Image: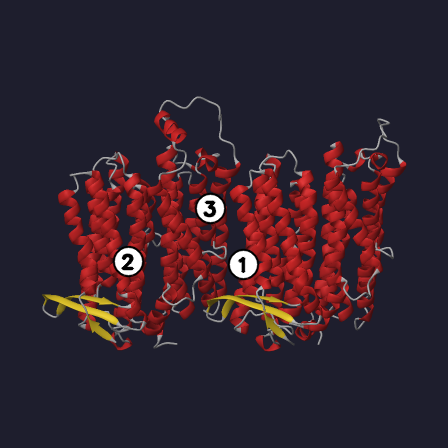
Amino acid sequence: MQEVVDIRPLLAPAISIICAFLIFWKGENTFLRRFFSLSAAVTKWIIVLSMFPVSLKGIIFTYELLPFAPGISLNLRVDALGMFFSMVSSTLWIITTVYAIGYMEGEHARKRFFAFFALCVSTTVGIAYAGNLFTLFIFYEMLTISTYPLVIHKETPEAMKAGRKYLFYTLTGGAVILFAIVMTFYLAKTTTLSQNGILSIEHGVHTLTLLFALFIAGFGVKAAIMPFHGWLPSAMVAPTPVSALLHAVAVVKAGVFGIIRIVYNVFGVSLMKELGVGPILGWVACITIVCASIMALLQDEFKKRLAYSTVSQLSYIVLGAAILNPLGALGAIVHIVNQAFMKITMFFVAGSIARKTGKKNISEMQGIGYKMPITMATFTVASVGMMGLPATAGFITKWYLLNGALEMKPPQIGFVIVLLLSSFLNASYFLPIVYRAYFVKPLDGDIAVGEAHWTMLVPCIICALYIVALGLFTDLPFVPIQLARVAVEQFFR
Amino acid sequence: MEKISILPVLVVSFPFLMTLAVFVWGNVSAKLRSYLSIFTVLGTFALTLTMLPASLNGTVFTRQLMQMVPGIWFYFRVDQLGLVFAATASLLWVLSVVYSISYMEGEHAQRRYFCFVLLCLAWTLGVALSGNLFTFFIFYELFSISTYPLIVHEESPEALAAGKKYIIYILIGAAFVLFSLVYTYVLAGNLNFDKAGLMSMEMGRTKLLVLFWTFMLGFGVKAAIMPLHGWVPDAHPIAPAPFSAILSGIMVAMGCFGIMRAIFNILGASVVKTLGAGLIVAYILCFTIIVSSLLALEQDNLKRRLAYSTIGQMGYVTLGVVLLIPYTVWGGILHVVNHAFMKGLLFLCAGTIIKKLGKKNVSEMRGIGQKLPVTMGVFTIAALSMIGLPPLAGFTSKWFLCLGSIGAPHGIIFVIVLLLSSLLGAAYFLPIVYTAFFQKPLGEEETPHQGHKEHEALWERKPEASKYMLVPMIIAALLVFVLGITLELKGMPLSLIKMAEKFFLGGIN
């Protein structure tokens, strides 16, 4: 496998850190704040994109920052999986920034909001590019801290409570991860992520199983695996752009990404099979998928329903990783981008409705489709995608996950049933929203069209189009799924 | 390689002589006193640093001054461990003294304050650079005594009570140290620190155990190992803030430093390992770490909360030492350095809050982040570092401690204790940050309270602390960050600590 030393892995996270400091410095000025945010987002996107074609050839970028301690250094290493994750987050950063500019109009503490927003994106890309567990952990903890001011942005008692809950869950998870990393370093004498895993069966089955459980429990907090998901629905009190980018993409995906790294780069496929923990993890994910979907059915608050749906969708990715064959892994990785675009569209829609009409509960949304037809159309596309209907992104995921589950030896019919059941549940909690929006007349009879501001509408449309594109074009040379294929190849060589 | 040099003597005598100068001219003008004090601490720090390059190459500076009693010399010896401690102390003193100039403005007995602060620096360096237990003990005691006027500086009944408690604890501890000193001489006939251990198992297990425990009791008072910690939560909050920083960062660490000298240089790592008593101490320390964190949660007085945190954090240091594993020893010694700047910074911030807003209790600190943005900003950095979040200094020592103790017998327990303590740290530090930044002050529009009138006026005119107070705080915050990421750089503490560890533990690993 070819590796090249390159400064770009450092530049990509650095851009948004610089942006954060610039905003802290001159952020009172609305124009400068927008200028810094947007130009940093675009610059970062271009940097990430410039690595994409090379990464597609299977070439790995590395950059050693500085030695930290004997055997450990801060280093960045961009393999196909990391590249994939960074593409998703940097693309969505641009879209969300545009949306946030519209959404945050008139809010207080916008300087703080945009600065920490940039910081979060920076640490997310850091997580994607981390070359060893140690670097990963550093960025992971920085993400925890820099998200806090965003969660409590409103500073209401409810927000403060959610913030406390968030910190309690994630810091505890962080401590567990640190424990696991220390244990890994003790056993393997290294924490460098390698394509075939760094641990071997000689370390003892019980020790390794314990270690695996610790890692899953630790990363499981951000990945919202039940019963560690409690913080996510509460954190929905944050402003919508935060829920959209962080609680649908960056933070939760960081947890899932961590799990994928653990499964493939720390333990490795062959060791995972020897330990036999794959199916167990798979069943944990299945339980989360079903329970979270049922919880979603019971929510009336729009964002809470979306949050539970996120909990359920994240476990698709965990399930795909646990299937431990190329198809399952492909499904898992592709779902990182698919779920991101689908869920972010939904959050954008929820935010637009809340901003425009002040309605937060689904029961109040009769006839909202008359009022905001385009917004609700994008929501419909995203819902259909979530259900996994063909020609949308969600179908691709389901296709690979189902194939992966069937290809296991012996075939896991249980997983197949859960996946199909989950599609049904998705339909039953998303379609009523669509139905209510379009086919029930508004109570007050007000059906005048009044879409949200274009900065909020355009991101919805772009994302919706992208959902369809992701579902249709899976064999063109430069689509995300090709990169996912390279990543899978790197894990299963 | 040993080299006879006058440097250690200079390092110790320079601040001592300058103290005399401050004493003589201290009342001429405040400006002169300030400049003299700053010159002293900067000069001392520079002098200490001149020994660094040679020490990095393995040179040990020694100097015998005079014979005190037959066979025992007044003896300086600068090994790597001593230099780490000396450099940390002299740098923290620079920050603290510069800060004091503005903090002490308008206080009574300023000359006394500055004289004793500088005197304490001289004694601390004496402790760090001493070459045998006898010299060590002299400076150790001088330091204990010279601290008293600083702790009772306020001269309020509370301060005097805290001072009394302090002196009783410390003198009892000193008695145990003195006993150990004599007993060491009886057993080994030698008190020098130049070997990795003077004792051997042939001297008898019981005798060695007695020696071990008397050392632990003696130094344990200053190192604030529970249940010997009683003086800390009273003395730390009552002293002027810049000196609280030193009390917390250096004085308690000096107890730990004594334990290091006792274990590594007197008893010897292999003997301590054979005795097996280290593990009992380790469990006591686990208790100390957890209980002190729980107690810290209860405190409303900010400085008192910080004091309890110090007890727990110094438990880390001693834990690292008694486990006798290379990584834990690194982590322990490194934590002396890291903790000095983190906790020093926190105390300086607490001082700024007291000085500028007159607020001592966490519950009164609603919304002070708006009034003191920089102070509370650096406070946040230090607090995050205390919790052990990367890439800040506190994380590095915790990392090594965890890494080492996982290999120890029952090591998992220690790792769990360390991580639990981090979480408890989050539980008692983050609410302060949260109160300061995210809570609105009660009755914001109210007319200021009668008693606080001058404070109110002060911050309306000048919301943030003065530059003499701000600059040390910002430097400390930068240090907390730099120490967190430049671990492997030559000349940073770890490079010296590694050499020290190799010398001390070379025999057993």
> Looking at the picture, how far across and down is residue B262, in whole percent?
28, 65
Residue under label 2: B219
Residue at position x 44%, y 46% in the image: B378
Residue at position x 45%, y 64% in the image: B400
Relative to A73, does residue A370 appear above or below in the rendering? above
Residue under label 3: B380
Gap between marks 3 and 2, in whole Å? Answer: 32 Å
Relative to B60, does residue A120 appear above or below in the rendering? above
Amino acid at pointer 3: Thr
Q: Is residue A334 left or right of residue B454?
A: right
Q: Is residue B125 left or right of residue A167?
A: left
Frontmost of labels 1 and 2 is 1
User: What element does badge 2 sit on?
Assistant: helix
Dot 2: few (<14), some (14–19), or many (≥20) neighbours within 10 Å? Answer: many
Dot 3: few (<14), some (14–19), or many (≥20) neighbours within 10 Å? Answer: many
Q: Which mark is residue A138?
A: 1
So how many labels did they put on this image? Answer: 3
Amino acid at pointer 2: Phe
- Quarter holding the C terminus of chain A is bottom right
| Depth check, front residue: A387 or B409 | A387
Q: Name which of mark 3 and mark 2 comes first in the sequence.
A: 2
From this viewpoint, is residue B414 visible?
Answer: yes
Amino acid at pointer 1: Ile
